Amino acid sequence: MNLLSNLPFSWRRLLAFLLLAGVAGCAPAAHEPAYRIGFSQCNTDDAWRQAMLAGMEKELSIHPNVHFQMLDARNNSDLQRRQVRELIRQRVDLLIISPNQSGPLTALAEAAYNQGIPVVVLDRRTTSRLYTAYVGGNNQEVGRRAGHYAAQLLRQRGQVLEILGMPGSSPAADRDLGFQQALAEHPELQLVAKLQANWQPASVLQRLPAVLRAHPETDLIFAHNDPMAQAAYQVARQLGRDQHIRIIGVDGLPGPGNGLQLVEDGALKATLLYPTGGEEAIRTALRILQDEPFEKDNILSTMVIDSTNVGTMRTQTEQLATQRQDIRYQQQRLREQMRRYASQKTTVYLLLASLLVAVLLGALAWRSSRNNRRIRRMVEEQNAEIRLQRNQIEQLAEDARRSSEAKLRFFTNFSHELRTPLTLILGPVEDLLTSPAELAPAQRHDLKLVRRNTQRLLQLVNQLLDFRKIDVGKMAVRATKSNLVAFVRELMDVFEKTARRRNITFRFLPAEPVINLWFDGDILDKVFSNLLSNAFKYTADGGQVTVSLQRGPAANTVRVSVEDNGRGIAEADQPHILGWFFQGSQPSANGSGLGLALADGLTRLHEGTLSFRSQPGHGSTFEVTLPLAKPATFLDAAPAPLYTPSTAHALDDEPLELPAEVAPARTDATVLVIEDHEEVRNFLVQKLQPHFQVSTAADGAAGLRLAGETIPDVIVCDVSLPELTGLEVAVALKGDWRTSHIPLVLLTARDAPEQQIEGVQAGADLYLTKPFNPTFLLESLRTLLRNRDQQREHFRRELSVDTATVAPQRVDQKFLADLTAIIEANLDRPALSVDDIARSLGVSQMQLYRKVKALLGTGVTDYIQSLRLTKARQLLLHEGSAIAQVAYQTGFSSPSYFATLFKGKYQVSPSEYKALHTPTHH
């Protein structure tokens, strides 16, 4: 009786009727109205089409009363027209059209609309407004966002190439229009070419190489979809320009090989999210069919997905996939309940003779229906929650991107701004230390303490800038093929003095005398210098530091190891020792937590690996593994920038020493100082006034005007100036015949190699980075003026006239002659070192190293070795000369070592060479 009392009133009436009539019957079941929706699409992008259909299927899953018929025209407009005509003939309740081109489907969409069939246009508009509703992205907004993002990437200046979709399709036209509108707001961005690719990656692969060769300065490519963007990346990589050209796509679909994966892998710089609109199209169609309010134009939002938010998007996509799996599970349960409900209804219809069975089955069917409605409400609530989470994800991603950009800007600006006050600290200190005035020992000690810690702060600033470059992918590898053994030996020479002073055994153990590979000397200089500095820092006096170099166990690799017997690394610190700003449980007083992290980042940038092993109390070994072959990501090395003291290593915390004695003042020479920072300008005037006639200007325009009026003998100019930058001033000075001969010194806080090259290319004779040594600046100005006088005198003698045009002339021959003479005079000394030669020439070791490297393309040690072998070859031709005697005369420590190096250079042993060139007596 309790079961019967719980039945609906209609069921109880039916039961009473059956009892009274004694006949079998069935109760009509209530159904939702059934709808037939026809869908024709013509998009050839499989990933985009699958994502759109997945959204439609998810939305249709909660509407089992809808019969959905999908027809795929596969980029064939004629086939799509036939499909739409067939759907109109079938009199579907609603027609959804996703055209490939706007024109061909316009007439059929109007015909269906005029016949009373609601028409929903998806993704691409027709050329007429005769349709019921439109669902799709704002393609103009997609184009505008891509243009603004491109301007941000290129810092408002560069050359851009656009790859368009099919002519006549509304997405291609609107994206192109929006992109051009955005570029118009940035006059320095130049759209150099457009490529019609018809949405086809194959067309991009075929035609883009010729376009890129015609426009080699292209900085960025905007493709109208991600498949074409991926094809553009393949072309750029084939041409070796994938590191220079940034690529932006459109779609932002998840899954392997799609937009999110391409951004995460670094193939694309960014992709614009372009929702497929599948879910919204079905929801709009159902609102139309159910006579509910709807919007005629349903515009879907977009956003930029780049490295700052792609991880978040991928995580959320995975969460959405999990939730969809849950929905499918609920739908499966729903279908099971529906099947059970149908089975129970059938049982009721077949077993009406048994009233009790019919009542029980009816009650069960009623309960199942109630469960189904509850499940359906749960699914709808989950869909609403998913949409809310997606909106929140987009907002969080945008906030994260802005926060990341602000942080990076702060690092860069803060590091650059530190250089100006460092100049005003280090300059006077260097002046006091090198001045002839007597200083008390305590005063000199305190000044050296200030100088040493100022230089440490400068080193930290440089490391912060390198960290920022690695973090944003702005540091490129510019490699040359050279001998790694000689390169490492030259770096070790810098630490020889420290090793001798602290009685540390410092050994170099190369497995081979020559190992050639492609590497960036500036990057590996920082890596090995950091590792060697750490080894000396944590090794006690009297300890041991060993550098070994050999081919790696893996094919085509070389391994450099730096081993010490210092205190080692605590086991708790080892998992984190290569992390940024990590100082460990026993931090060093001079540590910043940047050195090892920077070395690791630079090694990975060089396509290598940095590993270590350490035993507390017994020392550590750091190993750098590098590829022998040239990776595709390496660029060819740029010309070496002008050397300035601020770019040299600090040796044992001792800065570059410059002579205290200066030449007599040349008071008739005039110097123009162009500097906007008042304290730096006053400091320069104070240092130069005793030696030159000084005039000043506070901005670039005033300085350029004053230079044209006064024609000074030399100009000192800051790079960062208001109105006109220092680079613009340099170009203007060198382009004006009145001022083109004036030597120009650029001062700046920007010390990146590419920035120095930019300054030299603009016409600078010297490029000094802040903080600079004022004595070095003074001597440099005197040298520039003296060289100009020598050039004028040379041309006066050559041409036998009173005046001559000053032209640039190399003056390095005397340096090479002096260097060669010193080496040849000491050729029989095995202990001849780079330090000895540097003292003889009156320069520092690093100055000598960089000078010889710039002139000869080799290190000092290799040059000494080359002269020894050349002299030995000459001596071997003398009759009666013994190989051992020749080896010792030319400064080799042993005949065997001499024989190895001789055969390595001339491919024959000394004895074979002597036999070949000694005449045979009969």
Image (cartoon, helix red, strand yellow):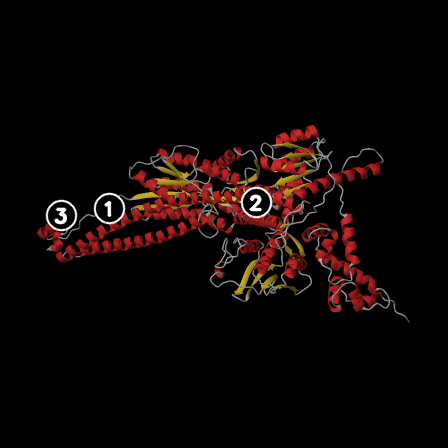
Single out the mark in the foreground, 3 or 1: 3
Q: Secondary structure at mark 1?
A: loop
Whether residue 911 is visible to the viewer of this picture, yes or no, is no
User: Looking at the image, which residue sits at the far left?
Assistant: 20
Compute the Cα span from label 3 to label 1: 19 Å
Three-letter residue code for mark 1 = His
Sooner in the amino-acid sequence: mark 2 or mark 1: 1
Whether residue 393 is visible to the viewer of this picture, yes or no, is yes
Give the labeled residue for mark 2: 245
Q: Toward which corner of the image does residue 562 lie, by quadrant?
A: bottom right
Compute the Cα span from label 2 to label 3: 74 Å
Single out the mark in the foreground, 2 or 3: 2
Front-most of 896 and 839?
839
Rendered image: mark on residue 425? none
User: Looking at the image, which residue sits at the far bottom?
Assistant: 922
Three-letter residue code for mark 3 = Phe
The reply to whether callout 2 and callout 3 are in contact (CB within 8 Å) is: no
Compute the Cα span from label 2 to label 1: 59 Å
Front-most of 827 and 604?
827
Three-letter residue code for mark 2 = Ile
Residue drawn at the location 54% of the way across and 62% of the way down: 612
In the rendering, at what x and y percent does residue 157 appear?
A: 57, 38
Give the labeled residue for mark 1: 31
Q: Is residue 25 left or right of residue 604?
A: left
Badge 3 crowding class, 10 Å Cα cut-off, few under 14, some 14 to 19, many 20 or more, is: few
In the rendering, at what x and y percent does residue 266 appear?
A: 52, 50
Give the labeled residue for mark 3: 9
User: Looking at the image, which residue sits at the far top?
Assistant: 709
Up-down relation of residue 66 to residue 861 (above or below): above
